[in-house]
């Protein structure tokens, strides 16, 4: 029996992501920035929307397996989508192209892993997400020169929060109130906190400086 609050946090985050997408578009001063903001904003909407739908609805066994695949796929999409504004607006030339190809290629590969191995161990999924997410760390030196140390530190903080969430997901600990708010809800809360820090960096610093 799943906790009563399962998926509720991501349901709220989904509704918040809709105006957040509009804010991103309004913060984009160029065509390139608008494209990057659209990809990033839609990845936020998709990840939180699918997660809320998967966790809030009581599915049949078969439908639940497919929704689980889609839920894992959207995590990969958000990782690559979050990197997209950095790859497009902070990096340049061959480095930008190679980084974007590697990030989206990794997201696709991770998605295929979960599609064909839906029962993959939680620890393996967590490791894949962390490795893929920290693959964007290559942009940090360029980000420092682009927007300064403060936003770069905020971006790193978001990565640390995502990593903490992955650890909670893999270990299934802490599990404070299993019938109401369990380890998965802690994981979801950390994902929201991480997404909020990354959103602040993109909306307040990366897009306006494009």
Image: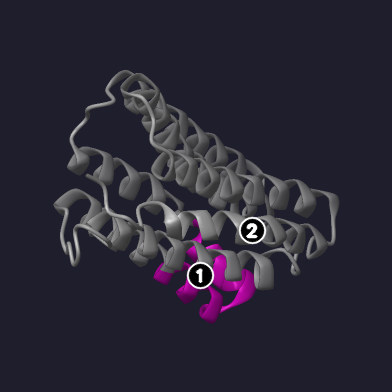
Res. 65 image quadrant: top left
Say which residue appears at 76% left-offset and 54% top-offset: 33
Q: Residue furthest bottom?
A: 150
Q: Quadrant of the N terminus?
A: top left
Q: Residue 176: x percent and y percent? A: 18, 67
Q: In the picture provided, is 123 more to the left or to the right than 41? A: left
Which class describes the residues within 10 Å of circle 2: few (<14), some (14-19), or many (20+)?
many
Q: Which residue is mark 1?
A: 197
Can residue 110 be seen in this snapshot?
A: no
Q: Residue 149: x percent and y percent? A: 52, 79
Q: In the picture provided, is 93 more to the left or to the right than 5? A: right
Q: CA distance from mark 1 to mark 2?
A: 17 Å
Tell whether label 2 touches label 1 (CB within 8 Å).
no
**Nearest to the observer: residue 89 or residue 76:** 76
Q: Secondary structure at mark 1?
A: helix
Question: Mark 1 vs mark 2: which is more N-terminal?
Answer: 2
Can residue 14 be seen in this snapshot?
A: yes
Which class describes the residues within 10 Å of circle 1: few (<14), some (14-19), or many (20+)?
some
Residue 149 is a magenta residue: yes
Res. 75 image quadrant: top left
Q: Magenta stretch: dominant SS?
A: helix
Whether 7 is drawn above or below 104: the answer is below
Q: Secondary structure at mark 2?
A: loop
**Nearest to the observer: residue 69 or residue 185:** 185
Say which residue appears at 32% left-offset and 18% top-offset: 116
Q: Quadrant of the C terminus?
A: bottom right
Say which residue appears at 17% left-offset and 62% top-offset: 175
Q: Which mark is residue 90?
A: 2
Look at the image and give the residue range highlighted in magenta. 139-157
Q: In the picture provided, is 116 more to the left or to the right than 152? A: left
């Amino acid at each position: 029996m799943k906790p009563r609050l399962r998926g509720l946090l991501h349901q709220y985050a989904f509704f918040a992501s809709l105006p957040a997408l509009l804010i991103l578009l309004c913060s984009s001063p160029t065509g390139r920035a608008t494209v990057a903001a659209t990809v990033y904003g839609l990845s936020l909407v998709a990840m939180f929307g699918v997660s809320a739908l998967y966790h809030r609805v009581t599915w049949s066994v078969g439908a639940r397996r497919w929704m689980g695949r889609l839920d894992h796929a959207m995590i990969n999409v958000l990782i690559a989508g979050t990197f997209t504004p950095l790859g497009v607006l902070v990096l340049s030339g061959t480095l930008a192209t190679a980084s974007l190809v590697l990030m989206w290629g990794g997201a696709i590969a991770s998605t295929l892993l979960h599609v064909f191995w839906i029962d993959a161990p939680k620890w393996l999924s967590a490791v894949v997400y962390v490795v893929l997410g920290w693959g964007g760390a290559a942009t940090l030196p360029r980000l420092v020169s682009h927007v300064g140390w403060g936003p770069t530190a905020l971006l790193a903080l978001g990565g640390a929060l995502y990593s903490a969430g992955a650890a909670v997901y893999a270990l299934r600990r802490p599990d404070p109130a299993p019938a109401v708010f369990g380890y998965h809800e802690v994981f979801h809360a950390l994902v929201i906190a991480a997404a909020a820090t990354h959103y602040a960096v993109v909306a307040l610093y990366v897009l306006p400086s494009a």
